[in-house]
Amino acid sequence: QVQLVESGGGLVQTGGSLRLSCQVSGSILNVGIMGWYRQAPEKAREFVARITSSGDSNYADSVKGRFTISRDNANDTVYLQMNSLRPADTAVYYCNVDKIKYSVGGYDFWGADYWGQGTQVTVSS
C-alpha cells in the first residue's frame, strides 16, 4: 500500500551535479523523517542526509557543503541535490522514511522503515 519511488540517478563527470527525487505513494496521512543512504560496491550502506517534516536536516561529513536535502510535504517527496560530485560519491542511492501513517479501507495504520528501490549514481573521473 505504500511505496517509495526514486528517480534522478545517472552518469556524470567529476564536478557535475545530479538531483535525486523520492516520492511516497499510497493513501498517505503522515510522513516522518525522510533520508538518503548510499551503498558503494563491496561497502556497507551509509547515511548521507536526513530531514524532518519541519525542515531540520543533517548530513554526513563527506557530503556537507556539496549536497542539499529538501522535502515537499504537500507531495510527500524528498530531494537530494548533489553538487561538486566526486568519483567517491559513486553508489546506489536509497531513500528511506522512518515511519509512515497511511489509510487502507477506512482504517489508519503506521508502518516503519521504508526503503526505495535504489538509483545508481556514477561519477566518472
Image (cartoon, helix red, strand yellow):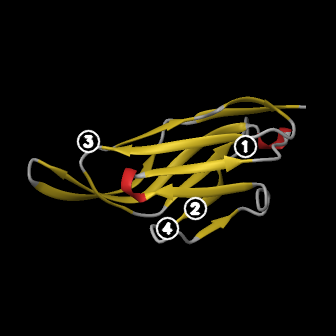
Q: Earlier in the sequence, mark 3 or mark 1?
A: 3
Mark 3 to mark 4: distance in Å?
A: 22 Å
> Which residue position is annotated with label 1?
43
Task: Please state the horizontal and vertical placement of residue 54, each as a whole percent of the image.
Answer: 47, 72
Q: Amino acid at mark 1?
A: Lys
31 w.r.t. 38: above or below: below
Task: Please state the horizontal and vertical placement of residue 91, each as a whole percent of the image.
Answer: 70, 38
Mark 1 to mark 4: distance in Å?
A: 27 Å
Q: Nearer the viewer, mark 3 or mark 4?
A: 4
Residue 52 got which mark? 4
Mark 3 to mark 2: distance in Å?
A: 23 Å
Q: Amino acid at mark 3?
A: Gln
User: Circle 1 sits in a helix, a strand or a loop, which is it?
Assistant: loop
Q: Nearer the viewer, mark 3 or mark 1?
A: 3
User: Circle 3 sits in a helix, a strand or a loop, which is it?
Assistant: loop
Task: Bin the neighbour count of mark 3 within 10 Å (Cα to Cα): few under 14, some 14-19, many 20 and up.
Answer: few
Q: Amino acid at mark 2?
A: Arg
Task: Bin the neighbour count of mark 1 within 10 Å (Cα to Cα): few under 14, some 14-19, many 20 and up.
Answer: few
> Which residue position is annotated with label 2?
50
Mark 1 to mark 2: distance in Å?
A: 20 Å
Q: Earlier in the sequence, mark 1 or mark 4?
A: 1
> Which residue position is annotated with label 3?
1
Q: Amino acid at mark 4?
A: Thr
Where does the C terminus fall, quadrant-wise? Answer: top right
Image marks 4 and 2: residues in contact by CB distance under 8 Å: yes
Task: Bin the neighbour count of mark 2 within 10 Å (Cα to Cα): few under 14, some 14-19, many 20 and up.
Answer: many
Name the residue: 26% across, 42% down: 1
